Amino acid sequence: MAGLLGTSSTVGIFASKPFSSHYSKSSSFSLSPSPGISIGKKFCGGIGVPIKKERSQFHVLVSNVATEINPAQEQAQKLASKESQRPVYPFAAIVGQDEMKLCLLLNVIDPKIGGVMIMGDRGTGKSTAVRSLVDLLPEIKVVAGDAFNSDPDDPEVQATEVREKLMKGEELPVMSTKITMVDLPLGATEDRVCGTIDIEKALTEGVKAFEPGLLAKANRGILYVDEVNLLDDHLVDVLLDSAASGWNTVEREGISISHPARFILIGSGNPEEGELRPQLLDRFGMHAQVGTVKDAELRVKIVEERARFDRNPKEFRESYSSEQEKLQQQIYSARSSLSSVTIDHDLRVKISKVCAELNVDGLRGDIVTNRAARALAALKGRDNVTAEDIATVIPNCLRHRLRKDPLESIDSGLLVIEKFYEVFA
């Protein structure tokens, strides 16, 4: 597998300024019927009385009560946050683990690949690699002051309020911000993940105040779940629903609010602590396996680099700044040229033939393999996909889709490689 990857020289090892998290907001929505907002007798969770029909006649305009922050004030807050936050280990300083790093970079280049599941031994740098990705994340355009990172140009990832304003012909302020990375803690409650509705205000004042959750913050960003195989089943169901539809719906006492929730799902875990449910595993576009480094010289280098970082994080980050900037520029160029990368029809047919002969369920394997191969070609600075690109990514795209029995372990990728050479010979 290492020989097939051969991407360390091409991928490079990429630093930008520290990442600052978005400011928190709360939004207030009315009871007036509109897309994504409905009122009825149905309710889920909690104990309460269904809303009578008379209540549904409230007509209050949708309003955003998020804290108003002008661009200059927001920029100052971001700079202050960057200075005060904990230093992040540079992505460029991670030694080895080429397969994991490549999967992460390809998902940054093309978020539609669908995320990556990283499984491996304890202490192999899984969470370090994911969190170091924040320095390399590119900027995106968002509607200023919107709690859901709405895209000003794409209605599919716009909040209801933003869409209504655009339909009225209003001009919305637009700003650029880095892609958000949100950590989903194992102990998080469903309300913290999905968001909450103030039922009392809804019943007494005819206004429902919605406090966005982690899924709202992760829209158009990255949602990272460490030890994802230990996640509670009810949170797994929430992630499955959002990943399938791209929307998160919160329902309480017959009141329903929906908002876009399209994110790159990145999970990491140790297979000894349990396997993932097949439904969730299939939602990850790629699967990366990491193992403990066996080479003594390499282990010494990893220990020394970590010791340098712990002694003086700022100096250590500065020593890798040029490599980080080079990698960041490479990602930016790859994202810009991705739309022009082509893959021959003959190669598409062979990819689908591999998937069919491996009895991969559904077409998600075909789609992800095509996308990952195009992203890799863009990363290498080419405008066409080669068989070598496909050989590099196809094990990561298919190995976790071969398991039919939940008690079976995930194949290492050898079966996929054997079938690849048989079809592409």
Image (cartoon, rainbow, N blue to C red):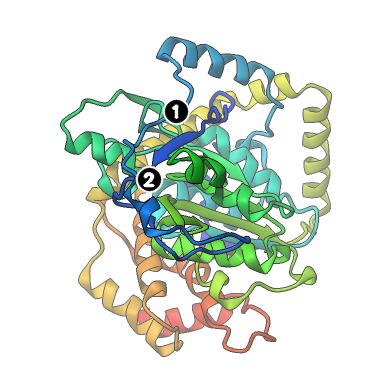
Q: Residue 382: give x, y in percent of width and height.
A: 31, 49
Crowdedness near tag 1: few (<14), some (14–19) or many (≥20) residues, C-alpha within 10 Å: some
Q: Which residue is drawn at 34% across and 57% down?
A: 374
Q: Residue 411: give x, y in percent of width and height.
A: 62, 79
Is residue 96 among what the camera can see? yes
Q: What kind of element bears circle 1?
A: loop
Residue identified by numbered label 2: 31
Q: If you read the primary sequence from the N terminus, does the residue marked by circle 1 or circle 2 appear first? A: 2
Q: What kind of element bears circle 2?
A: loop
Depicted 74 relative to depicted 4: above or below: above
**Mark sitting on residue 65:** 1
Where on the picture, by quarter, is residue 335? top left
Q: Residue at x 49, y 74 (%)?
A: 398
> In 3D space, how far apart are the residues under numbered discs 1 and 2 (Cα atoms)?
15 Å
**73 lies left or right of 39:** right
Q: Which of 109 and 249 is in front in this view?
A: 249
Q: In the rendered structure, which amino acid carries the disc numbered 2?
A: Leu
Marks 1, 2: nearer the viewer: 2
Crowdedness near tag 2: few (<14), some (14–19) or many (≥20) residues, C-alpha within 10 Å: many
Is residue 12 among what the camera can see? no
Q: Nearer the viewer, residue 272 or 51?
A: 51
